[in-house]
Image (tube, helix red, strand yellow):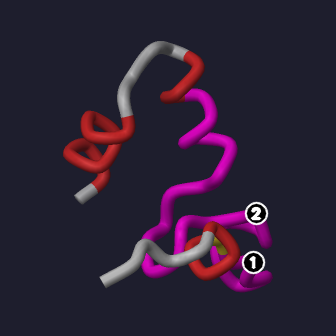
Amino acid sequence: MSNPSWKDRITVNPDQCGGATLHSGMRIRGIDILGLLASGLTQTEILRRTS
C-alpha cells in the first residue's frame, strides 16, 4: 500500500475552521501542523497528539 499524496491529505472547507487548510478527516489546521514541526516535534509525535 502506498502513501497518499499530500494533495489527498489536505482539504479546505469553508464550514470548518473558517476555511483554513485542514488535515483531511481531522480538524487540525495546516498552520498548526507547521507550528508543531517548527517547534521540533516529529511526524510520529504529531500523529500521536492528534489521533
Amino acid found under the numbered disc labelled 2 = Ala
Secondary structure found at label 2: loop
Residue 39 percent coordinates (x, y): 51, 14
Q: Residue at x 39, y 78 (%)?
A: 2
Q: Quadrant of residue 32?
A: top right
Q: Which residues make up the magenta segment?
A: 11-35
CB of mark 1 within 8 Å of CB of mark 2? yes
How many residues crowd mark 1 within 10 Å: few (<14), some (14–19), many (20+)?
some
Residue located farthest toward the front when viewing the structure as drawn:
1
Q: On the image, numbered disc 1 is attached to which residue?
A: 12
Above or below: residue 39 compared with residue 13: above
C-alpha distance separating marks 1 and 2: 6 Å
4 is within the stretch colored magenta: no
Q: Quadrant of residue 31?
A: top right
Viewport quadrant of the N terminus: bottom left
Q: Residue at x 50, y 57 (%)?
A: 28
User: What label sits on residue 45 in the rendered view?
Assistant: none
* Left-right relation of 46 to 11: left
Q: On the image, numbered disc 2 is attached to which residue?
A: 20
Please state which of residues 27 and 8 is positioned toward the viewer in this rendering: 8
Residue 40 percent coordinates (x, y): 45, 14
Please state which of residues 21 and 19 is positioned toward the viewer in this rendering: 21
23 is within the stretch colored magenta: yes
Secondary structure found at label 1: strand
Q: Residue at x 72, y 64 (%)?
A: 21
Amino acid found under the numbered disc labelled 1 = Val
Q: Residue at x 76, y 63 (%)?
A: 20
Residue located farthest toward the top when viewing the structure as drawn:
39
Above or below: residue 45 compared with residue 40: below
Q: Quadrant of residue 34?
A: top right
How many residues crowd mark 2 within 10 Å: few (<14), some (14–19), many (20+)?
some
